[in-house]
Amino acid sequence: MTGARTVLALMALAIAPAAAAQSLAPARTLAARSIITESDLVTLARAVPGTLKDRAALLGQETRRILYAGRPIRPGDVGPPAVIERNQPVSLLFRRGAIEIIAEGRALGRAGIGEALRAMNLGSRNIVSGVVTAPGQIRILP
């Protein structure tokens, strides 16, 4: 009997992660730029490859496009809430060693903290790329 119990215990362990790995979908249609809350999510009966499965990671994220009820959520559908809007004045910060340069710029898109964003340096009119580090601030990549 102990051998049968061991087999049953192993089968239960193998099934548990599969149940936790089900895909998530919106409970209702969500407009672009909506912040996702617990009541916005439902768990699908099946796992769909290439879709998001971690409910906690989705909470507080912003929708990047319209999400339709019942359709699985993919990684490109959501992101951190935007702290910089298109055409917003921003500070461009460039650091290399002990040298630090701060310039005025204008955002060419919208992005959240940690996301890549292009901006125009207002002094030189050059387009630069960087990462959003705080509201209104972009760290320029060397």
Image (cartoon, helix red, strand yellow):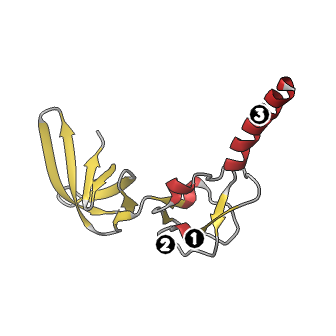
Q: Earlier in the sequence, mark 1 or mark 3?
A: 3
Using the image as rendered, state which of residue 40 and residue 15 is in the foreground. 15
Which residue is disc 3 drawn over? 9
State the image coordinates of residue 27 (x, y, percent, origin top left): 64, 71
Q: Earlier in the sequence, mark 2 or mark 3?
A: 3
Is residue 106 positioned above or below 8 on the image?
below
Instruction: Write the residue at 31% across / 63% down.
Output: 107
Which residue is disc 1 drawn over? 40
Instruction: Answer with left or right where residue 40 lies relative to residue 21.
Output: left
Instruction: Write the residue at 49% across / 61% down.
Output: 59
Using the image as rendered, state which of residue 84 and residue 59 is in the foreground. 59
The residues bearing labels 1 and 3 have C-alpha atoms spaced at a distance of: 35 Å
State the image coordinates of residue 14 (x, y, percent, origin top left): 75, 36
State the image coordinates of residue 78 (x, y, percent, origin top left): 52, 60
Instruction: Write the residue at 27% across / 53% down.
Output: 138
Which residue is disc 2 drawn over? 34
Using the image as rendered, state which of residue 110 and residue 57 is in the foreground. 57
The residues bearing labels 2 and 3 have C-alpha atoms spaced at a distance of: 43 Å
Q: Quadrant of residue 123?
A: bottom left
User: The N terminus is located in which quarter?
Assistant: top right
Q: Label 1: how many residues lie within 10 Å, few (<14), some (14-19) or many (20+)? A: some
Tag 2: amino acid: Ser
Is residue 32 positioned above or below 15 on the image?
below
